[in-house]
Amino acid sequence: AIQMTQSPSSLSASVGDRVTITCRASQGIRNDLGWYQQKPGKAPKLLIYAASSLQSGVPSRFSGSGSGTDFTLTISSLQPEDFATYYCLQDYNYPLTFGQGTKLEIK
Amino acid sequence: QVQLQESGPGLVKPSQTLSLTCTVSGGSISSGGYYWSWIRQHPGKGLEWIGYIYYSGSTYYNPSLKSRVTISVDTSKNQFSLKLSSVTAADTAVYYCARVVVGAIDYWGQGTLVTVSS
């Protein structure tokens, strides 16, 4: 199975900050990567698919980039509702595998 | 708007079989192009993909669970189901059903906590 390594595992930031989360795949996965946001007690929500495509209804402050093995999720200006845990997911092949998550906390 | 809803026992005894059903509304499970999946999340931990079923009945299971997992579909009821046998405390988790399309998991159920305990 492809291993997905996210960093950092946790991050403290302030409203208005620019934040970047990275995800590295153990082998090349083209651009077959998505980013998900999960709030406590809720199911994950799709933010970005195909590495850089914004899901309908997701604010434009979220963006994704990368291909091959290295990917990033950027939030350009943090809003209070963005404090959550973020996961990457590779869908290059099965079994689908997630990164371990990045918990974004208020500084 | 597609909606998914998990149902099933919240408590299962060790060595028994965990059984969950996902009911899909707002769309047909028989529509091609979707892989109806189960995903779980151990308390306070990350996400683990369990497996999928296509409307035709073809399946793929995570090798880490393959020997214990069965996923089935009932297109007449617009439902798909998960069975996980020989459960232990390590199978205690929130179980999600979800729809996978090429490139993303676009719809999720709300999740259901299953606790394995005697």
Image (cartoon, helix red, strand yellow):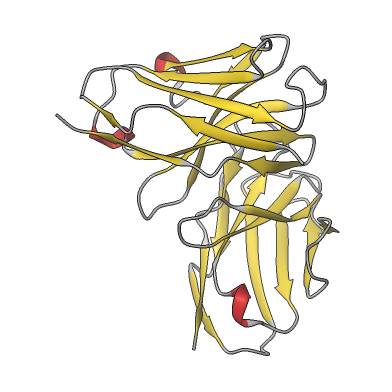
Left or right: residue B113 compared with residue A27: left
Q: Is residue B10 above or below residue A47?
A: above
Residue shown at 20%/24% (left/top)? B14
Quadrant of the frame with the C terminus of chain B:
top left
Residue shown at 35%/50% (left/top)? B43
Occupied quadrant, residue B15:
top left
Q: Is residue A4 above or below residue B29?
A: below
Q: Residue furthest left?
A: B118
Left or right: residue B91 compared with residue A38: left
Left or right: residue B16 compared with residue A20: left
Q: How many marks?
A: 0
Q: Between residues A14 and A33, which one lies in front from this camera angle?
A: A14
Q: Position of residue B2 (x, y in %)?
A: 73, 37
Q: Position of residue B83 (x, y in %)?
A: 43, 18
Left or right: residue B42 compared with residue B104: left
Quadrant of the frame with the N terminus of chain B:
top right
Q: Position of residue B13 (x, y in %)?
A: 21, 24
Occupied quadrant, residue B100:
top right
Occupied quadrant, residue A59:
bottom right
Q: Between residues A56 and A33, which one lies in front from this camera angle?
A: A56
Q: Is residue B70 above or below residue B23?
A: above
Q: Is residue B70 above or below residue A19?
A: above
Q: Position of residue B107 (x, y in %)?
A: 68, 42
